[in-house]
Image (spheres, grey):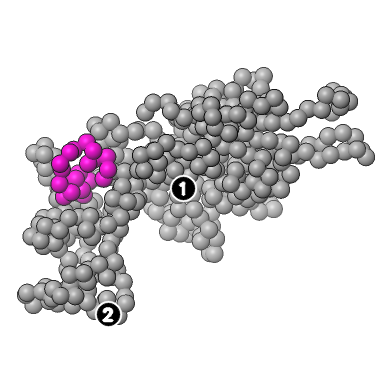
Amino acid sequence: MAEERKWGMVVDIDRCTGCQACVIACQTENNILMSSEDIVQQKRAMVWIRIERYWEGEYPNIKARFIPVLCQHCENAPCEPVCPVYATYHNNEGLNVQVYNRCVGTRYCANNCPYHARVFNYWERHTAAPHMQVYPADARAAEPMNEYLNPDVTVRTKGLMEKCTFCLQRIRRVSRQATVEGRAIADGEVQPACVQSCPTGALVFGDLRDARSQVSKLAGDQRAYHLLEDLGTRPAVTYLKKVDPNARATSPSH
Amino acid sequence: MVVLLAALAGAQVVAAQLGGAPDQPIGFTHLTHATTLQIDCTFCHRNVTKGSTASVPAVQQCMFCHAVVTGQTPLTQQEIAKVRDAFQNQLPIDWVRVHRVPDHVRFIHEAHYTGLRARNPGISTQNLCATCHGDVASTIKVGQVRQLRMGDCVACHRANNAPTDCTTCHK
């Protein structure tokens, strides 16, 4: 297959209200294990997209700001070369892919990821001996939560590295549909769960190779920057943030 | 075609290791329907050209013919009566599933049907389906004839110049 597309996302921080709708949508779409309080306290919570909070200004003129952080699908991904079993690689659509069947759980990739986008699954779903289930789809979560699982996404077991896939299952569904109908994928037709759920439209997803797509236009915005740009990872996720030229410089210790 | 049939003949031996052909609740024979009556596979397995599952026909679909066709021998009359009873009592028929790929595989029948058609112009539907399912049309009870493991899939994908990116099949 020729390199036709390069999927990318734009996150407009000026629009983000920190409502966490994307986090919940992602969790539901991708069968991510629901992290209970004790799991979070052990710092082993399962999230593929998280909202990072920071403060702007000094009290009383202080503002809460939010950055949604997800896998950046870096072109120069630090996670990829360290995998000893080639379980993570870059595919021809610009996605950083995690192959669960290959993953042996060394966690090197998570160590090498500067964005903390990868999560290791320390948890087993409450099934009767799940590793004995040849087809875990039949009994993969305790009642009644077995009903919520998305059949288009694998239920991962303990001991695997997981991360954002840009809702690969949705990309696949739309591209197959487009192939059947003999047409190209329209801009905005593929929407990952986080993008779909964002009430303020802070997240935009699309093809970065298509110069007319909304995501390409926004990625060229004046406000655009990348997370930890100086590391040279070349992320596919672009952030937009207006920097106030009149703002007082914050102290370096901040 | 000869090569394909020879390969399938070899695969038939494996079938017993793959669980063979399970007993079904009704003595349905593909031999009668697909070979003697020459009904196209897609007439009953309608979704095969449209979606991911091939789909087992609804009982109502059996009644397209069996509302009239009641069978010629005592044995067939007995089996066809089961279908008619199921329809009248509005009960589904509990067919035993023969083919199943693991949970982490995304298999789309439509893509394979379309792809194989495009690569083999003029192929009959029976021969097309036989690529993976074996010569179902001349069997009484259906069993699994191919491994349908990843190596099997990848070998065929390579031979047919189909995509081999992991995300094509793994979800």
- At 17% from the left and 66% from the top, the residue drawn is B28
**Left or right: A151, with A42 as reference point:** left
Tell me, yes or no, whether the highlighted magenta stretch contains residue A135. Answer: no
Chain letter for mark 1 = A
- At 67% from the left and 19% from the top, the residue drawn is A230
Task: Name the spot of residue A217 as percent of width and height, x first.
Answer: 60, 29
- At 22% from the left and 46% from the top, the residue drawn is B132
Element carrying mark 2 = helix
Asked where in the image residue A85 lies, by quadrant, the reply is top left
**Left or right: A14, with A153 as reference point:** right
- At 72% from the left and 40% from the top, the residue drawn is A15
Same chain, labels 1 and 2: no
Task: Name the spot of residue A142 as percent of width and height, x first.
Answer: 53, 61
Up/down of B155 relative to A157, above or below? above
Up/down of B38 relative to A53, above or below? below
Residue A83, visible in the rendered structure:
no
Residue B92, visible in the rendered structure:
yes
Quadrant that contains the N terminus of chain A: top left
Q: According to the image, label 2 marks what residue?
A: B88
